[in-house]
Amino acid sequence: MELLNKRTLEENIFKILMMISISIVVGSLIIIVALVIINGGPALTLELLTQTSSGEFYLGAGGGGILNAILGSLLLALPATGLACIIGIAIALYLQKDFTHPWVAGFVRFSLDILWGIPSIIYGVFCFLIMIYLGMSASVLVGIIALTLLEIPIITRYMDESIKLVPIGLKEGAYSLGSTKFETAVKVVPRQALPGILAGILLGLGRGIGDAASILFTAGFTNRIPSSLFDSTAALPTMIFQLSTSSLPIVRQKASATALVLLLIVFTISILSRTLSKRYMKYVIK
Amino acid sequence: MSTECRIQIETKNLNVSFHGHHVLRNIDIKIPAKKLTAIIGPSGCGKTTLLKSFNRLLEIQDDVKISGQILVDGKNILAPRLDVPDIRKKMGLLSQKPYPLPMSIHDNVAYGLRIHSNKNKGEIESTVEHCLQEVGLWNEVKGRLHDPASRLSVGQQQRLCLARAIAVEPEVVLCDEPTSALDPLAAQQIEKLLLKLKKDYTVVLVTHTLRQAKRVADHVIFLYFGMVIEQGPADEFFNNPKNPETKAYLSGEIS
Amino acid sequence: MLVVTVAVSLLFFSIFFLLLFKSLFIFEQHSLAEILFSSSWNPGFNQFGLYPIIVGTVLVTGIALIIAVPISILSAVYIAEYAPKKIRKIVRPFIDVLAGVPSVVYGLCALLFLVPLVKDVIAPWFGIETTGYCILTASITLAIMVFPIIISLCVESFHAIPLSLREASLSVGATKWETVKKVIFRASAPSIISAVFLGFGRAFGETIAVNMVVGGITRTPSTLFSPGQTLASLIVSAYSDMMSSPLYESALMMVALILFIVVLLFNIFGIFILRRAKKRWNF
């Protein structure tokens, strides 16, 4: 049957194209990980992890390590995630049907969607302008604020979606036992929504640790470990950015090693997110 | 069973498991050609699974294991390396809820035609008209053939799905509780159509209303917990059931 | 809670107005048309022509999408319709992980792998010489970054289509591919379009990775193998210089404003179409 042969041929051609496509996608990730490991592995020494960088660090072998960047990233991302959580919970709870008119909730969710899509450089520029206006200089504080703004849409949306998914029956059950709207919102709903909320928080944290554009202008860069909120600080992404501009292979190796550290952190967060979600899923009633 | 009837579909030791659950057990049935065979039984007993095994639609889901033989006109359709779309073409399917394809009324019916045949535009249009007339939809839609099919009422959509199925000239029409989502008037229309269809096609109807089966069936298969309890011509089945479970089902004790 | 919510909702207005305000200075000195269409960007000589950078941005983003969209859609079809369960289970996490890789790491890997590849393999094949820091390299890098977005949105939308619709097509004797072509693509067309819009928004705004490999030359690129510059990358490149004059600073804020508006528009379109598709198919 001629017709069928043509149809099967077309299907087979596209099947091959599909296999090629998925191989490209999967292959990209494999290449990225391989590159970082192969290139950065040799430079991943104890010295790299435990010392701060110095001027020589960027010019050749030796010269310290990236401790300042590691600590800087933690100093920036952890408080930012915490702040974003607090703000996120406040907004997510407020958005629940019980408290607001649906139009208002719709508008808020829409603006969160938009904020999600804004490139991180814009957040960086925005905070930079305000920073200049207030007469401040690039510092941990401004960096934290920039990262908080970046993470708010992510965390809030996950919290909102998870809480929305809580079945009405569960809330009604709680109401019928006598708890107020607020009590239910704070005690019953979060447990059920926990896996989703956790996923969101960890996703936000991962983004905060990995993002460079927003902290480039706002957190500055330095070889020292910051001693106050008003010091500049290096961070892993900005350190990678700095090191990769070098034309010396040995400095680029350090960049790869730093990238390896960063990837390990981000992957760990991702795995943590999955396992914690799974663990708390058992409390969730479907 | 009358020996004059040709057997269209026959299963031998058909077993189907879904995700490890043994849904159909050792099914041996015979479905006569050009008659309406009703598959009846309580909900969840495997009726739809049996129906969808005839056109090999079960396989598109994950974790399905099928063993045994299904003979259509004497050929085992479960044999390896067969052209499955071709097998499916011989069986039309009418589902519980109508699922019009996301296209116009005309294109819904023409869908199968365009895939399978080399007909030109004029031939396709006349076939579409013919099928729509067969299902009694033509007068209702002739002025708006290029409107989206989703604008039709549920009853009309179901008739459209039937037109779509018969457009490719199947030999068998498989119906999975086709009236359960319809209002009584639309349901009646579909039943009338099925009675009309059985002159030209073998109709296999899954239904869980006994009354419907009594109204339209020539032949009945009773399925209970995945096993065939009894099968036979409708008169014998309804008036002279042999099995205790059959009797219990017919009298309404189990449902 | 109300205060917080209001503040956050109005954040994008605040960003918009602040950028607008800061851009006003340069608009006083140069007209919009002049900025958009004149072709030299030489802040030191009071020349702020964005044309070469706009061309660079369009090229980089456009080619990235030309590469990314077919590959992503085909991959999504494979994952949703063809892959056996075991493969699906492995591939889905891959996509999620790819989405989580920070852009600076993408940039670094592009530096290490793509730049030499383009310089020593691809360009010579066309008989062109290049440093490897060019439009093409940036496009390929961006394409890879955009894969996860388009793939996961498409897979989600394919999964939302009811099984029975596929059965309806298959039962008439269509092959799986025909079902995908004629039914699934039609039914998820809005979602696919929306995914492409959102992917475009992401690509347009990507700063760091592009900055590392695009070459940073503010001249109109003559071929794909020429170095160039994009709007987002320009902001980073010029950062240290911008403090030198308020006009320069204003110009860069204007670039940020343009970036913001374009990405905003694409995201709004994408979100609207996605929401309508979600309502229709209930996912």
Image: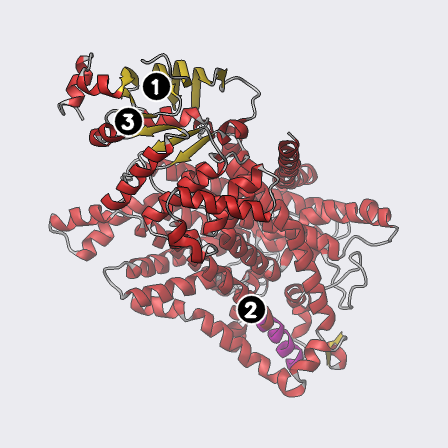
Task: Let me know if residue A105 is in the magenta part.
Answer: no
Residue B33, image quadrant: top left
Q: Is residue A109 above or below residue B93?
A: below
In the rendered image, which residue does mark 3 sit on?
Answer: B217
Chain letter of the residue carrying label 1: B
The numbered disc on residue C240 is none
Q: Secondary structure at mark 2?
A: helix
Residue closest to the eye, B111 or A271? B111
Residue C263, image quadrant: bottom right
Taking the spot 70% from the left edge, 73% from the top edge, the residue there is: C50
Chain letter of the residue carrying label 2: C
Amino acid at pointer 3:
Ala
Amino acid at pointer 2:
Phe
Q: Is residue C221 above or below residue A130?
A: above
In the rendered image, which residue does mark 2 sit on?
Answer: C260
Taking the spot 48% from the left edge, 29% from the top edge, the residue there is: B90
The numbered disc on residue B24 is 1
Left or right relative to C167: residue B255: left
